């Protein structure tokens, strides 16, 4: 496999082609988190509803939602053209039920809908942008609407040495299993990790350590009636939030 990673492209443009294969390898909770995201959408499989996927990337969460909810329709939004090209190809068989839009989620219009979800996107957004974004999300959701937010975030007391070591052991075992099973090579894993480190050092892959407590406070201030931590695996966390019901 070609592990070369050209520096002249944006981080996500460079990793787009291998993202779906390597993301579950590099982030052990990722596949379980996506399963939970789908399970937490408060509709039955035969219900009809509208959704928006914010920061959809290659649209793996959207694909899973469309597969599970056969009458759901929606829009997935991202600002990276290379990721969206893969998303459009992945969603070809659902073209009558999904719109793929290129836009900046921190400023774009969010159409009225019943469910909004986002997976592994908000840690790239600066804290100052979140209050206005949560307000736009709450305003777009219909009464009783639901936000499912899946991302890495801190919850409660910061980890001590033992928790950090166990997290590292868990990830290392996961990487070793992936190499042993042929899902990925050690060379390409090392190349991706080094490239991410270099891009971070150059300010091209900015990440923020949000806390669940701060996110929840911002959501409540934005108009959500209820917000809770409903799933967690090491740093990977899902927040579930609801707007006030129409008769509230």
Image (cartoon, grey):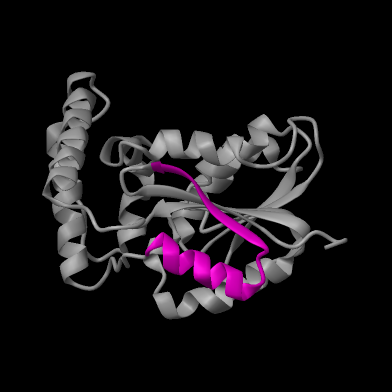
The reply, left or right, for residue 6 in relation to residue 217 is: left
Tell me the quarter of the picture where residue 205 sits: bottom left
Asked if residue 212 lies in the magenta stretch, the reply is yes
> Magenta part of the protein: which range?
211-232
Image position of 39 (left or right of 35): right
Q: Let me know if residue 151 is in the magenta part.
A: no
Look at the image and tell me in which quarter the C terminus lies: bottom right
Could you tell me which quadrant the N terminus lies in?
Answer: top left
Residue 16, compared with residue 30, is above or below; it is: below
- Residue 179: x, y in percent? 18, 26
Q: Residue at (48%, 78%) from the top-left corner?
A: 129
Taking the spot 23% from the left edge, 19% from the top edge, the residue there is 181
Q: Position of residue 164 (x, y in %)?
A: 17, 47
Q: Nearer the viewer, residue 159 or 95?
A: 159
**Residue 160 seen anywhere in this rendered image of the structure:** yes
Q: In the rendered view, would you say 108 is above or below 116?
A: below
Q: Residue at x 28, y 35 (%)?
A: 25
């Amino acid at each position: 496999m070609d592990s070369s990673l050209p520096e002249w492209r944006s981080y996500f443009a460079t990793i787009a082609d291998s993202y779906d294969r390597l993301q579950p390898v590099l982030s052990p909770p990722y596949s379980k988190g996506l399963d939970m995201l789908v399970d937490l959408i408060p509709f039955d499989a035969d219900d009809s509803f509208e959704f928006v996927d914010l920061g959809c990337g290659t649209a793996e969460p959207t694909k899973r939602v469309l597969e599970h909810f056969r009458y759901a329709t929606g829009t997935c939004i991202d600002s990276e053209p290379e990721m969206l090209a893969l998303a459009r190809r992945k969603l070809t068989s659902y073209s009558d039920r999904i719109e793929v839009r290129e836009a900046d989620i921190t400023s774009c219009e969010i159409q009225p809908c019943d469910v909004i979800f986002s997976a592994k996107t908000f840690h790239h957004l600066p804290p100052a942008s979140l209050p206005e974004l949560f307000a736009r999300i709450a305003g777009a959701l219909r009464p009783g609407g639901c936000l499912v937010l899946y991302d890495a975030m801190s919850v409660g007391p910061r980890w001590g040495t033992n928790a950090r070591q166990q997290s590292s052991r868990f990830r290392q075992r996961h990487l070793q299993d992936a190499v042993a099973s042929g899902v990925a090579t050690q060379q390409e894993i090392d190349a991706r990790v080094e490239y991410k480190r270099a891009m971070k050092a150059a300010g091209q892959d900015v990440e923020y350590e949000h806390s669940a407590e701060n996110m929840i406070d911002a959501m409540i201030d934005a108009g959500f009636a209820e917000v809770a931590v409903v799933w967690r695996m090491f740093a990977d966390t899902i927040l579930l939030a609801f707007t006030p019901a129409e008769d509230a």
